[in-house]
Image (cartoon, rainbow, N blue to C red):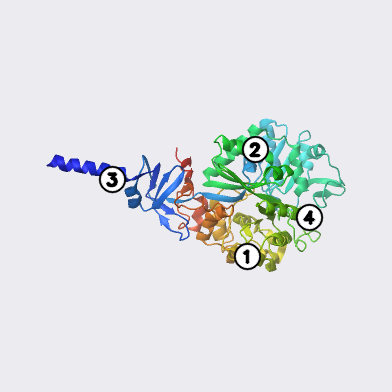
Amino acid sequence: MKKIVFGLFIMSFLTSCEMKQKADFLIINAKGYTVDKEFSTCSAIAVKDGKILEVGEDNYIIANYRASEVLDLEGAPLYPGFNDAHCHLSMLGVALSRVDLKEASSFEEILERLKERYDHSKPSFLAGDGWDQTLWGSDEFPSNGKLNELFPDIPVVLFRIDYHAVIVNDVAIKLLGITPGDSSIPEGEAIMEGNKFKGVFLENTAERFESVLPEPTEQEMADMILIAQEECFKNGLTSVTNAGGSLSLIKVVEKLNNNGDLKIRTNLALTPSQENLERFTEPYNNGRIKISSIKLFADGALGSRGALMLEPYSDKSTTKGISVIAQEEFDRLCKWAYNHNFQVSMHCIGDAANRQALNTYAKFLEPGNDRRWRIEHAQIIAPEDVPLFGKYSIVPSIQPTHATSDMLWADERVGERLKSAYIYKELLDQVGWLPSGTDFPVEAVNPMYTFHSAVYRKNLDFVPSEGFQMENALTKEETLRSMTIWAAKASFEENLKGSLEPGKFADFVVLDKDIMTAPGKEIPDIKVTMTFVNGQKVYSLLP
């Protein structure tokens, strides 16, 4: 009798296993935030073929699915993979290979870092990223005299933290072939010392100094992108929007995608070169790549006084900043984008730049449209222009750490106009959603810093204690949505990713603490323990 009962039990067990749907692996015992419409939670997920089969509670998923691999998270928090809506993947790879100039407290410290690199490897050129003269006390641009003394025979090109200004030595200037009064230099883009170059150049002229440096080979660029990809996975990013890509960069990324090395989902915004516009005549998807937008610039950066303002700078009444696109060209590119069903993503920092973009978009967009044309940064906006975001469904693409990086000196630049800057909550109320990112390598890759800045409006020193212009802080739920589902929506991919829902890509991230419940002071130090893309573990904190 016992043998019969035992046999029936075995048969029942085997039958129940056969009735279960097969999955590749299960996640159980998680504290999962689905970021669906209801912002519901779950504790278990079934995954198959790189997609989510179902989410639910442990008992339900275990009862209905079988898999050879079951990952018990032991109560750890689980989120959709983070999506950086505005960054520079290739530039991150390049920056990781250059001299790191971030957080240098003086130009003398910059020189010491350069000398250390030179003494170590005796390179044929020196390139560095990340200097910020607002940290040096005087806020004045230095001259290049010391660079000329220390490095008289090799070109030195040092990019400001926002990449809108450079400090270069005379060797680099000579290699570029420019002289004072050169008609190829737009007004205001060369900082002068009497009738001589000071060695500091802004905007388009600054960008020209890239040509002085040896261009990476295709293999070197591929290696840099893969290094940057690993840095993204380490920080929980499973998707990025690369804000501007040349055809040569796109070809490298395509090759990495085709051979399976590109794992991170990459939305490439086109640099509007003629070769790009001729090759990509309609939105394009292939594997981990999506191309459906063009990246334009209206102005420069606030720190270098390149942001285009309606009125002169409060700390320099002789300038209103720099316009980097002619209206005729702006109109032409918007018309091309509209006719080819591409998004426009326009870099706008100053209030004049934002006004130009909003009014130009309005020439092409009808109220209630779903084109999702974007303004990148949307940093300083005249109050009377804010309603245009809502009227024409224009997407403000924000980088919360810019607010907490700029807040200690931005009032010197714009005075009372600072009240109209970094108005994230007000912009959210206009459109109902907004994507966020970091703009790395201008800022750190870490999305925890994004979350902390958006919610608490404090820097990593937890300053100011009461928060910066807290009326425009986002809630934790709004911020998490901006880093996941809203970032996906910004590239028309909300049905593919951005939340933990059946049918979507199995992209998710596990943290060592829950950002939704952790105290504010703990959030910047929260670590990613695992990152998954397409159901594949691409990063683990533990071996």
The reply to whether callout 4 and callout 2 are in contact (CB within 8 Å) is: no
Q: Spatial distance from mark 1 to mark 3, Cα to Cα?
A: 54 Å
Query: What residue would you read off at disc 3?
Result: 16
Label 3: how many Cα within 10 Å (few below 14, some 14–19, many 20+):
few
- Whether residue 136 is visible, yes or no, is no
Q: Where is residue 103 shown, x and y percent of the image?
A: 64, 48
Query: What residue would you read off at disc 2?
Result: 251
Using the image, determine if residue 391 lies above or below residue 89: below
In the picture, measured across the screen, residue 171 lies left or right of residue 133, that is: right
Q: Nearer the N terminus, badge 3 or badge 2?
A: 3
Q: Nearer the N terminus, badge 4 or badge 1?
A: 4
Name the amino acid type tagged 4: Glu
Query: What residue would you read off at disc 4?
Result: 328
Please report the residue visible at 53 percent of the width from the left and 43 percent of the height from the top.
Answer: 233
Query: What residue would you read off at disc 1?
Result: 390
Q: Disc 3 or disc 2, which is closer to the eye?
A: 3
